[in-house]
Amino acid sequence: MNKSSNDLHTLSHTTWNCKYHIVFAPKYRRKVFYGEKRLEIGAILRKLCNWKGVHIITAEVCPDHVHMQWKTPVTRYRALKKSHLKLMINNFLRIF
């Protein structure tokens, strides 16, 4: 494998590398993320991800959507953590 050892997680018979690509977009792809709002959204997304223990690999705020790639420690509640974080971010984006 050509992956670095930092990206791979292993157990006795398993090797994995879980990353998630999430795109948040407002209804009808309205162009609402610009100027000062763009900086605020970036800061708030970083705070939310740090609070939930999610490592942001890449993030980009475009005028009409937000791309994020993140990875999270593998736990049995991984899906719950991902859905809870998406719900919190979606609720926040409704404010804008």
Image (spheres, helix red, strand yellow):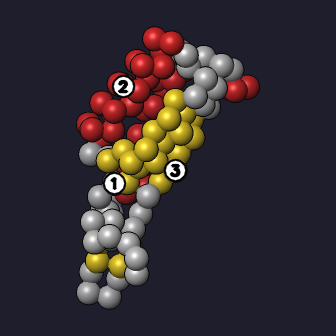
Characterize the local packing of mark 2: few (<14), some (14-19) or many (20 or more) Cα atoms within 10 angstroms.
few
Q: Amino acid at mark 1?
A: Thr
The residue under the point 41% across, 63% down is: 18
Above or below residue 74? Residue 43 is: above
Give 52 or 37, whichever is nearer the viewer.
Answer: 37
Label 1 secondary element: loop
Above or below residue 59? Residue 18 is: below
Residue lying furthest bottom in this view?
13
Characterize the local packing of mark 1: few (<14), some (14-19) or many (20 or more) Cα atoms within 10 angstroms.
some
Indicate the position of residue 57 as horizontal and vertical percent values: 39, 48
Residue lying furthest right in this view?
28
Label 2 secondary element: helix
Q: Amino acid at mark 3?
A: His
Indicate the position of residue 78 as horizontal and vertical percent values: 37, 57
- Callouts 1 and 2 close, C-beta under 8 Å: no
Q: Is residue 87 visible?
A: no
The numbered dot on residue 44 is 2
Label 3 secondary element: strand
Label 3 sits on residue: 21
Q: Is residue 78 visible?
A: yes
| Left or right of 46, for residue 60 | right
The residue under the point 45% across, 39% down is: 59
Q: Amino acid at mark 2?
A: Ile
Characterize the local packing of mark 3: few (<14), some (14-19) or many (20 or more) Cα atoms within 10 angstroms.
few
Q: CA distance from mark 1 to mark 2?
A: 18 Å
Indicate the position of residue 14 as horizontal and vertical percent values: 35, 82
Give 11 or 43, whichever is nearer the viewer.
Answer: 43
Residue lying furthest top in this view?
36
Q: Quadrant of residue 48?
A: top left
Q: CA distance from mark 3 to mark 1?
A: 12 Å
The residue under the point 27% across, 45% down is: 53
